[in-house]
Every structure is written in structure tokens, then in C-alpha cells.
Amino acid sequence: MNKSFVFLAEGFEEMEAIIPVDVLRRAGMDVKTVSITDSHNVTGAHGITVKADMTFKQADFEGAEWLIIPGGLPGAENLHAFDALNDLLKVHSSKGKIAAICASPAMVLAPLGLLAGKDATGYPGTEEGLIAGGASVKDERVVALDNIITANGPASALRFALAIVANSLGAQTAQEVGSAMLVYGKPMNFYF
């Protein structure tokens, strides 16, 4: 199985990065976190510092299956401003798979033309950026296409991750991983 990579920029949304890493690893997928800075330590939008597995300069993306782009602000802006990632995404889009969540579909993928003619979702308020990039905006938590998955925000990070697993390993594996985490169809009741 090929490696997948989750990109971390200062100000990334922590849930949107860590939940996919956790879920993909539970499914047995090889996923690594990549700092786009020169430091392995990257601080998220809510002050949580994560030690990335590697820096962008250390990574070998040849044959990668998924490139996964968390959102958050200013994380998505910082990812968008990193030319090496933009170049990688453009090349990878023709032969691999890309997943983006929250502000990143509109701020990272859409400006590169990667959503043109495709259904996509993103964080509420980013619709104009999606439309400007040629996407057909869907008011859904997750939009899963054959080689691109988009999601709308932190509360959808688990569904986003399971959609990636389903795409790579099949719906049965995604169901098994989700069931082991107590994700199931019953409504959740919260008692405080």
C-alpha cells in the first residue's frame, strides 16, 4: 500500500489533521504528517503543537496515494502560500488522490483549478472561493468522488477520514474501523 501524507502549516485545524491520521492508521494505512516549515513542530490554530513525522524537504512523495490537506486559519492560507505544495498538488492530481477539509477546498484546491467541474464542499462562507474555482458547491458534510474528497469542517473530520478509508480499502473496512470506534447509525444522546 502506498503512503499518504497529511500537511501541517502553522495555524492548522488540529481535529482535521489528527483525526484522519488516527483513523487511517487504525485501518492499517501508511500515513505520515509533513510540516511545510523547516521545523518538525507545528502549532495549530488552537495552540496545540504537533511534532510532524517529517518536513516537506525530507519527504519523498513518489507514488503517494493520498495528499491530505487540513483546514483552519491561518493554516489553509499558509498552505496556499507554499508554492512547493501547490506544485505537488497539481502534479499529483493527475495520478493520485487528494482530500481537503474546511477552508482548504476553497483556499488551496480551488485556486489551482483542481475542483473545476467537480462537486465539492467546504466550510460555510467559503462557497464563493469554490465557485470561483469552478466547483459545484454541495451543502454536505463530505463529498467523496473517485480521486478527490472534500469536507466542511472539524465536526466532519471523522466522516472525512472514513471516506478516505472507504475509497482506499473498501466500505467494509471503513465500516469495521468506524464500528470499532463506536460510529454507528443510532442518534447520539448527550447527557450533561
Image (spheres, grey):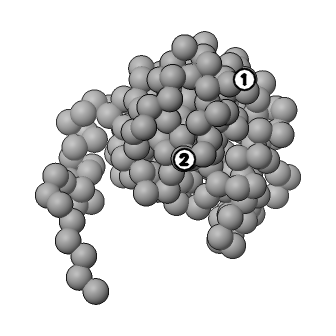
Name above or below for residue 40 compared with residue 48.
above
Q: Position of residue 113 (x, y in %)?
A: 68, 19
Left or right, 161 with respect to 58, comes to: left
Residue 103 can be seen, yes or no: yes
| Towards the viewer: 3 or 69 | 69
| Mark 2 element type | loop
Q: Earlier in the sequence, mark 1 or mark 2?
A: 1
For the N terminus, the image quarter is top left
Name above or below for residue 47 compared with residue 28.
below
Name above or below for residue 6 compared with residue 53.
above
Left or right, 154 with respect to 62, comes to: left
* Residue in view at x 51 percent, y 18 percent: 118
* Residue in view at x 73 percent, y 27 percent: 111
Residue located beneath label 1 in the image: 112
Left or right, 139 with respect to 58, comes to: left
Q: Position of residue 93 (x, y in %)?
A: 61, 19
* Residue in view at x 55 percent, y 46 percent: 123
| Mark 1 element type | helix
Task: Name the amino acid type tagged 1.
Answer: Leu
For the C terminus, the image quarter is bottom left
Name the outermost residue toward the left: 186
Q: In front of the other: label 1 or label 2?
A: 2
Quadrant hosting residue 44: bottom right
Disc 1/disc 2 C-alpha distance (Å): 20 Å
| Towards the viewer: 90 or 56 | 90
Quadrant hosting residue 84: top right
Task: Name the amino acid type tagged 2.
Answer: Pro
Residue located beneath label 2 in the image: 124
* Residue in view at x 24 percent, y 76 percent: 190
Q: Position of residue 142 (x, y in %)?
A: 41, 39
